[in-house]
Amino acid sequence: MTAEAILTRFREYLVGPSRFMTLVSCFELGLVDALRDAPPQTAEQLAAVAGVKPDAVQQLLYLLVKDDFLAYDETTGTYALGGLAEVADVDLNRVLSISRLIKVLMLRQGYYLTESVRAAVPVGLKEFYGFDGNVYDAALEHEELFESWGKTMDMYTAHIDPWFFENVDIPPGSRVLDLAGNTGLGAILTHKLKGSSGLHVTTFDLPEKQDAALRNFREHGLDGQCGFIGGDVFEGVPSGFDVVLIKHFIDMFDRSEVLAIFKGVRDAVEVGSLVHILVPVYPEDIRDSYSVDFFPAFFLGCAMGKGGPQKLSTYRAWLEECGFEVTRAIAQNPADMPADSWSAQGILSARKI
Amino acid sequence: MTAEAILTRFREYLVGPSRFMTLVSCFELGLVDALRDAPPQTAEQLAAVAGVKPDAVQQLLYLLVKDDFLAYDETTGTYALGGLAEVADVDLNRVLSISRLIKVLMLRQGYYLTESVRAAVPVGLKEFYGFDGNVYDAALEHEELFESWGKTMDMYTAHIDPWFFENVDIPPGSRVLDLAGNTGLGAILTHKLKGSSGLHVTTFDLPEKQDAALRNFREHGLDGQCGFIGGDVFEGVPSGFDVVLIKHFIDMFDRSEVLAIFKGVRDAVEVGSLVHILVPVYPEDIRDSYSVDFFPAFFLGCAMGKGGPQKLSTYRAWLEECGFEVTRAIAQNPADMPADSWSAQGILSARKI
């Protein structure tokens, strides 16, 4: 790399925050909506819709014209949908939902990334919400965090969990433990997507999740086939299960904690028992994705103060170190993912040996 | 543009804030400094230097390795300077200084861009500093703003003002007015770079700048050749000057205010008097630069709640609308600027007709 090439990359980094804000603001002000299914409009017309000055509309829309999101007609001085007209609503909604998550969970908190790494807690949550702890717990108390986080995660989970269950082996009649299973959604999905006679799924999570989990089971008519055990995975994993699911969990932790989780599971199950893990993974060649552009700052600066995904090969090595034989390790194919995605999920299946 | 191309661009936008933070944090934690003039080091060694966990070092450095800022040796597990070794100190210091400005003046404040545009004031300054007003005034009261803003601006002005004075005509013995000349730096530079027998330069700015300006003149031995007039440009421009300089000023305002400034100058000077303007400009084809990625969010969201640069052709038209003949309009050649720059300055010279 020449110095010039490196300085050119620096420029990309430097304009990253302002570019993101400008795009988000054009949507928040309703400028894009005003151009949907409507004739081309001038800055003055759009300004009237948004209740702002035409000068500001012109300034903000330069970027969207530059990048072909919108089209600008010099002759008439009007804006119209450009490339955005080609984007399906479902895709645009996903992108806007993720934008909202980034704005609310990351933009301000990112100011404290260095302090968060030093303290190993997300300092921004303390600064902006007065909250001591991680973003998942903070979201239970703060509506703004819950709304921006929950909406995106619901969209995401609905898409990714079916892929997980398609790709894992849960033998008929298994006794399944859903580790860190929150309020029971994973248990319910296990029955829906891998149901079999005699199948029983137990959600294991902190005791305060119990009431909501049991209510969810009842509402889905699964009282008899689901159960809840309250506890902390770092203090011991319940025994008596043939299959352990670990979904959306281990990316929150550093190596020593992931190893502690794996060892806890190993000590709790019999030889031959299965573990299935769902986790975002970095590609083996990190040049192939944008995931390292996003995740370190997210986990270290905004969510946990620690953690972050690993490569499939790293998780495989850690499982083997803890007494498991990995029977399958796959990652989503980027070609099957929307073009705006930076995060491929992986599935690791393993057997205690 | 296809939907896929647009979604791919969205991804670039979405990772912008996290990518910026990660880079900044690697420098703030001293990880890059630790690799300068030192043998390659492991994550554990770097973590010990920075006082953080090795897991966090690995996570953060993925991005710098991906983008060739650093090099990683898989065999030894060590990091070394990669492309950053090629970057001269003066260039790196400039980039880090601008990074600091973006972090302090923009990252958190950008959260309020939409509100700032609606209110036409930089709401983030109120939220984070309890300050009502623009960032230039806020910097006078808040050390953190002053330090990040002032350092970058000093570096920038030292570079750009000589280019300005090389390219403007200030006839010997002129009576010059430096409009919004702050504490007199422009007046001093005029003498240094365009000195002539009988030349006299008057700084015009708010009365509270007077003491500092007069002190600066004395310190430079220019008491007799410089003066200060206190006032507000929107309430009247002093008369009796052959040349008016307007540097680093009109980009702060919307069209109606820029026209008011031009008309104020026109009404204050005789026919044939000169005006020289220095201002960042958007290129005529905005696809040619990153300036629209940066400036709208900076001026609207962080600095003023309004304003932003225009194209040279726009400023030319506004000058003509106000009774000036534009004699010269030039912009910096991007090829002459460092590769990390996004902002070309322009010079417009005009004569009252």
Image (cartoon, coloured by chain):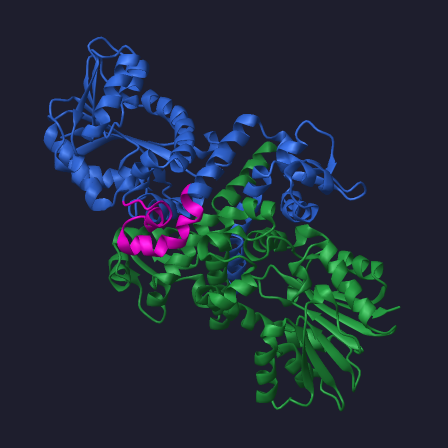
Chain colours: A blue, B green
In the rendered image, residue B110, in percent from the top left (x then y), is placed at 51, 50
Residue at 65% over, 43% down:
A52
Residue located 41% across and 62% down the image: B82
Residue B10 occupies quadrant: top right
Of residues B335 and B225, the one nearer the viewer is B225
Number of residue marks: 0
Residue A343 visible at all: yes
Numbered range of the magenta stretch: A105-132
Magenta stretch, main secondary structure, is helix
Q: Residue furthest top?
A: A197
| Left or right relative to B243: residue A64 | left
* Position above or below: A295 against B302: above
User: Residue A213 magenta-drawn?
Assistant: no
Which quadrant is the C terminus of chain B positioned in? bottom right
Magenta stretch containing residue A116, yes or no? Answer: yes
Report the side of A197 relative to B327 (left or right): left
Name which quarter of the figure residue A129 lies in: top left
